[in-house]
Image (cartoon, grey):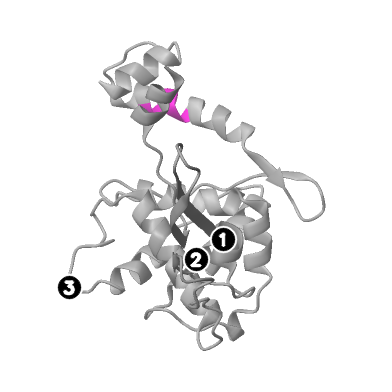
Amino acid sequence: QSLDTFQAHQKLPLVSDSEELQKILEDVGAAKTAEGVVDNVDGSYVVGAGLQNEVGEYNCFLNVIIQSLWHLKRFREEFLRRPMSKHVHVGDPCVVCALFDILTAICTASGDEKGESVAPASLRTALSTLYPESNFFQEGQMNDASEVLEVLFDCLHRSFTSGSGGFDSELVDSNCLGAWECSNSSCIAHTLFGMDIFERMNCYNCGLESRHLKYTSFFHNINASALRTMKA
C-alpha cells in the first residue's frame, strides 16, 4: 500500500515486474540524491555517497542516522578533525571509532567519481556488542532510528568526557529540582545536540511560580493533539 502511494505521488505507473520497478526507483533515487549536495572542504559541492543495505540486512534505520549526522556540516567537521587517539573507546569494537571510519569513508567516496557505497556493518557490529544479551542492533533485526541516535549520543558523551567531569549536579536553589546533565565543552554530543530545559508551573490567578525543574535532553517530544487543540 505504501509503495502504491509512493508511485502515485511520484506520478509513476503501478508496476508488478520487480526489475522494472527497481529501475524506476533507481531513477527517482538518483534524481533525489542529486539534490542533496553538501559543501566540500575546498568550497565545491559534492553528493554524499550512499550506504549499503543488502537484502536481509535491514540497515535502513541505521543508515538514515549515519547520513543525517554526515550531512550536518558542523558535526561532521568537528568530529572528523578530532584526534581519535585522545578519545576513550566505548565498546569492543569501539562505537566511536566505527562511526569515525564510516564518516571518513563517506567523505572519501563522495569525492570519488565512482561514488561506491559505504558499508555500515562495522558500526552495527560495534553497537550490537553493547547489548550481548539481547537482539538489539543485531544483523537482520529492525530497530528505531531514534534508538540508534540515543545510543550514539551516549557513546560520544562517554568517549570524550570520561574522567574529565563536567556534570552540573548542584542545585541552583532549594526550589529547583534536577540538574544540567553535562557542561563539559569537550562533549560534542551535548554541545551540539543537548537541550538544557527549564520547566516551571505558573498560576494564572496569583502569578505564583512553582515546580521548578531543570534537565538536559537530546529529544523533545511534542504532543500533536495538543498542538491541534491549541490551534483550534
Q: What secondary structure prevails in the magenta region?
A: helix
Disc 1 to disc 3: CB gap under 8 Å: no
User: Where is mark 1, residue-wise?
Assistant: 103
Residue 46 horizontal side relative to residue 153, left or right: right
Residue depicted at x 25% and y 71%: 131
Residue 75 point in image, percent of width and height: 62, 59
Q: How many marks?
A: 3
Disc 2 to disc 3: CB gap under 8 Å: no
Residue 2 point in image, percent of width and height: 30, 23
Residue depicted at x 34% and y 28%: 225
Quadrant housing the N terminus: top left
Residue 16 vertical placement versus 200 (above, below):
above
Pointer 3 local density, CA inside 10 Å: few below 14, some 14–19, many at least 20: few
Q: Tag on residue 12?
A: none
The magenta-colored residue range is 22-26
The reply to whether residue 99 is in sight is yes
Pointer 1 local density, CA inside 10 Å: few below 14, some 14–19, many at least 20: many
The reply to whether residue 117 is in sight is no
User: Where is mark 3, residue-wise?
Assistant: 133
